[in-house]
Amino acid sequence: MAWAQADYPKAGGTIRYVVPFPPGGLTDVMARLVGQQLGTRWGVNVVIDNKPGNGGQIGAAEVAKAPGDGQTLLAITLTHAANVTLFKGKASFDFQKDLRPVALLAGSPILVVVPAASPIKDFAGLIAAARAGKLNAGSSGNGTPPHLTLALFNDLMKTEVQHVPYKGGAPSMTDLIGGQLDVVFSNMPESIAHVKSGKLRALAIASGARHPLVPDVPTTAEAGLPQLAVENWTAIMVPSATPEASVAKLGAEVLKIMAAPDIEERARTQGFRVDARGPQAFGAYLNSEVERWSKVIAAAKISAD
């Protein structure tokens, strides 16, 4: 692998950036933004390869088994940190051994939304309604950030809001707008347009600070529940055999990309908060997220589909 350290990246070569989710989603949007910049800066062809399925596991498994030459990247999210627990003993690869961290890119806080016609007017009203009677909450699937946030809410509030899983965030938004669901702890990019159009009401944002896209929406901390702080982050990993020098070079370049003012602005307008961290810092954060969500998954008895 000496060539990878000395000559990485290959001038005029191709880097395959695997996104283990469908096009158009939170992970795909950020991967395309970074991939385009990386291709321009390095003079390489970066190809976004969407490999959805099995909660992000299909694409992750493919990259885990790819050559460690720095030519194959994997986009991951909070979902993959949860998958370490959800798919323990069931996966065809070992996430923490077969892949290595490159860089954390950005996070997007969970936005708590209800239909515009809902009698629930604020986060305190949601808590009261959850304690008083039966509510249901949609998500983009078992073990996804919206589901995990719901599980954390139920655990913190000792409530039993019923989980209704969907095959993606978009259909859950459709049913929420239509009144078939009471609430969704949503990925912000999936709900923000509906909040802006008045079809949904945002009750709170699950972060420590208000978001510039919805400055009037209080945080969960302001609403009295600071423990309900959840960001669906996105990041880059590579096969574990990738040389450390190549990982360091790639990580450093990605941090430069994310620090560019125009990239930060483009990310912000889509609901992201840039939170760029290199291999070591991201690795430590990833391990902490695996540990955090393993406890939530165990308490809520969540299982993979």
Image (cartoon, rainbow, N blue to C red):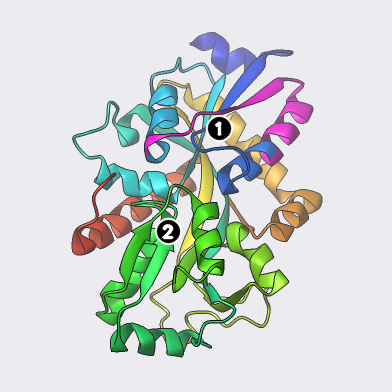
Say whether residue 83 is left or right of residue 17.
Answer: left
**Which of the two residues, 145 or 53, is positioned nearer the viewer here?**
53
Q: Residue shown at 44%/24% (left/top)?
A: 63
Q: What is the residue that sits farthest to the right in this orientation? A: 262
SS under mark 1 = helix
**Which of the two residues, 200 or 284, is positioned nearer the viewer here?**
200
SS under mark 2 = strand
Look at the image and say whether residue 244 sits in the magenta stretch: no
Checking the image for residue 248, the label placed there is 1
Callout 2, which amino acid? Ser
Q: Residue shown at 44%/89% (left/top)?
A: 124
The quadrant of the rendering that contains the C terminus is top left
What residue range appears in magenta?
33-54
Q: Residue shown at 44%/74% (left/top)?
A: 182
| Residue carrying label 2 | 139
Look at the image and say whether residue 53 sits in the magenta stretch: yes
Q: Can you say whether 290 is above or below 122 in the image?
A: above
